[in-house]
Image (cartoon, rainbow, N blue to C red):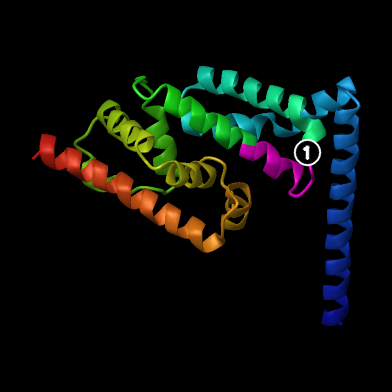
Amino acid sequence: MSNGIKIQEIQKSDRVINNRNNSEEQLIKKLIAGEEHAYRELIDNYREPVLRMCRGFTRSAEDAEDLAQDVFLEVFRSIDRFKARSSLSTWIYRITVNKSLNFVRDRKNRVYDNSSQVTDIENRGSIDYSAYKQLTQKELAKVLHKALDNLPAAQRTAFVLSKYEDMKYSEIAEVMKTSVSAVESLLFRAKKNLQKRLHDYYEKNLK
């Protein structure tokens, strides 16, 4: 009986995947054909995850909106070159990551007062702040933002995809074109680097 149930579950899962693939294939064809409603469908499907990802890199709602628009413009311009070697979502997320990293490099010295981002990361369980409660939210935001900006691109990308987009390691690996073990290593090193920057600031300024 249990084997029969498992087979049914597998068959159901296969049907869902096939339906999703067929739906995506139809959407891509409509996009290439320039059908307006297909563009609206694409934005409806991907606007929120793209915005979250952009904000994870930019830490600014306004900049994230602008960047997301650039992402979708690039998607629309490039859709006829999409080779379907990966899923449409993975391809869109790669474009988002590349544009976000370029944005970060271009505004390295830009300063934001956005302490709510610290609470957001803390709530996601990525960094232990218990040792730094003497820091104000504004101080913590400044240190963390600078630390994020100075992470190597691969570590920053893995961190944002994990902590802001809640992607599984396997999904991050697909977007970054790397292995799951490499993603695990990148996240481990990113967390260590962020904690070290906080610790160094605390030791230098508050002890």
- Where residue 114 sits, quadrant-wise, is top left
Q: Which element is circle 1 on?
A: loop
Q: Residue at x 32, y 30 (%)?
A: 141
- State the residue in front, 177 or 205: 177
The percent position of residue 202, horizontal first and vertical second, equals 17, 40
The percent position of residue 157, horizontal first and vertical second, equals 49, 42
Q: Is residue 110 within the magenta segment?
A: no
The percent position of residue 187, horizontal first and vertical second, equals 44, 53
Q: Quadrant of the C terminus?
A: top left
Image label count: 1
Q: Residue at x 90, y 47 (%)?
A: 22
Can residue 22 be seen in the rendering of this structure?
yes
Asked if residue 56 is positioned above or below residue 11 in the image, the reply reads: above
Q: Residue at x 53, y 30 (%)?
A: 100
- Where residue 118 sits, quadrant-wise, is top left
Q: In this picture, which residue range is highlighted in magenta?
A: 83-94
Left or right? Give the position of 20 relative to 92. right
Left or right? Give the position of 164 relative to 144. right
Left or right? Give the position of 18 relative to 86. right
- Furthest toward the left, the residue is 207
- State the residue in front, 142 or 97: 97
Q: Residue at x 11, y 38 (%)?
A: 204
Asked if residue 172 is positioned above or below residue 39 in the image, the reply reads: below
Q: Which residue is mark 1?
A: 82
Can residue 43 be seen in the rendering of this structure?
no
Q: Quadrant of the N terminus?
A: bottom right
- Where residue 200 sits, quadrant-wise, is top left
- State the residue in front, 127 or 95: 95
Q: Amino acid at mark 1?
A: Phe
Q: Is residue 87 within the magenta segment?
A: yes
The percent position of residue 95, horizontal first and vertical second, equals 63, 34
User: Neighbour class for label 1 at 10 Å: few (<14), some, many (≥20)?
Assistant: some
